[in-house]
Amino acid sequence: MTHSCPGTAHGHRHGHGHGHRHRHRHRRAERPSSAVGFRALWAADTVSQSGSAVTLLALPLVAIGTLDATAFETGLLLVSEYLAFLLIGLPAGAWVDRLPLRPVLVAGDLGRAALLLSIPLTAWLDALTLLQLYAVAFGMSVCTVFFDVAAQSALPRLVGGTELVRANVRLEATRNITQVGGPGLAGALVGALTAPVALAADALSYAVSALLVARVRPLGERPAARPEASLRSEIAEGLRFVFGHRILRALTLAAAVSNLCGTVGAAMLLVLLAGDLGLSPLLCGAVFAAEAVGGLVGSLLTRRIAAVLGQGRAMCASVVVSGLLWLLALPFYQADRRFAVAVLLQGLGWTAYMTFKVTSVAYRQRLCPEPLLGRMTATIRFVVWGSMPIGALLGGLVGQHFGARTALWVGALGELLAVIPLLLSPLRSARELPGEQGP
């Protein structure tokens, strides 16, 4: 039930006001699309996501199956996977805005490949420990912070503003297609080769992604130096842009609540499936495959849903309906035929959620001035993804003392609260999102 969206998402609609328009009033001019550059970025993302779908299942199964981790120890693994967004999320945006994007993207991929390869190596030497898993997960989160901020900043440089929604839909659709087979493949690999060895497949995918990212052009030159601007002032500028905009503020808070509560349950999902219910890796992978199928369908339906309901109302409905479906799925997670119903409802929840995710990401990319792209993305991810290690820690504590299923219930009920910031904003009735910043 986790919603990893760069803001898991975000961005919407009307209300212009006066507030913080100053030098950001004039948004960047529309630039022609670079089809070759976008295809290279798209291909790199596809390869990387294919391997990541394997790790999504294999890494916690290393902790649960190979190292006999408790519920709390498994929760700490998810804490480590997102901790960097909380610790360095804000300065990362300012750093990325000062650096050429392509080397940041390549370094992020190669770093993750090296970290993952250390797991099968130490397992072969019979030296694998939980402490190493935590270190690898945290190191990958650091690489992911920089890679994702740079990638989100790169997309508007490759694709014209009017094509951003279409480009984001393509990226989300492809990610979900790769994730359909990924968890099933992970289940088969874990069953045949053990979970540590299965992680080598993801390491290879990151290496291939780095080769593809190196071909992404044009991404512009290194930004001009701003000697008068301190790191603190640049971070503050990103914070003012996001929280000074009424719609971005509402979307960021909604996504933060959703991710906080969703991660409470997500931290314990495999503890319930593989631990309490004793389901095979293949059946565990079916849950993630259903999420991917649902996400694919939802991303393809996003534009149509927004056209029928209006963009703002569609986003509000997306959050509510997805939360209800995930809540309904929980009683059906049993080691019998009811499991199929749970998998179906889980997938439908992601179908509903994609309207919020895709529309909001495209909107904030279109809205933001180019020099602020990195800081805007990092600010949103600091709040939205930074809530996830907190949720995972809470999930581990609840799971350890009250059981994994209780943690899932707490998380699912909490996710319904995510709609409140949206309902308190102009989003509740808006059909169209505004084209420029307003408070």
Image (tube, rainbow, N blue to C red):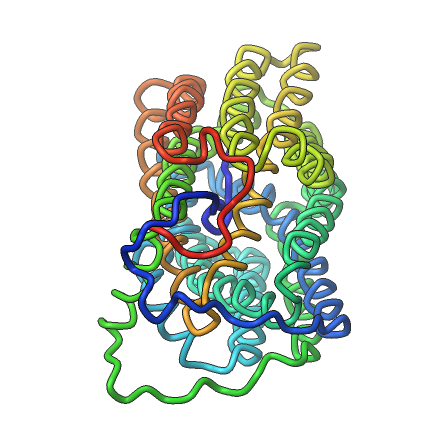
Picture residue at 67% right of the left edge, 30% below the top:
308
Q: Quadrant of residue 242?
A: bottom left
Residue 297 visible in the current orientation? yes
Picture residue at 33% right of the left edge, 62% below the top:
21
- List x then y, in percent, for residue 330: 53, 16
Picture residue at 44% right of the left edge, 51% below the top:
81
Q: Quick check: 27 left or right of 121?
A: left
Instruction: Say above or below: 337 vs 195.
Output: above
- List x then y, in percent, for residue 126: 52, 55
Instruction: Say above or below: 143 vs 411.
Output: below
Taking depth in this image into account, of 72 and 309 the one nearest to the observer is: 309
Q: Quick check: 249 left or right of 309?
A: left
Taking depth in this image into account, of 230 and 205 the one nearest to the observer is: 230
Instruction: Say above or below: 428 vs 29.
Output: above
Q: Quick check: 98 left or right of 314?
A: left
Number of marks in picture: 0
Residue 114 visible in the current orientation? no
- List x then y, in percent, for residue 106: 58, 75
Picture residue at 44% right of the left edge, 58% below the top:
141
- List x then y, in percent, for residue 416: 42, 23
Taking depth in this image into account, of 156 and 85 the one nearest to the observer is: 156
Instruction: Say above or below: 5 vs 365.
Output: above
- Taking the view exactly as shown, the residue that stands out farthest to the front is 17
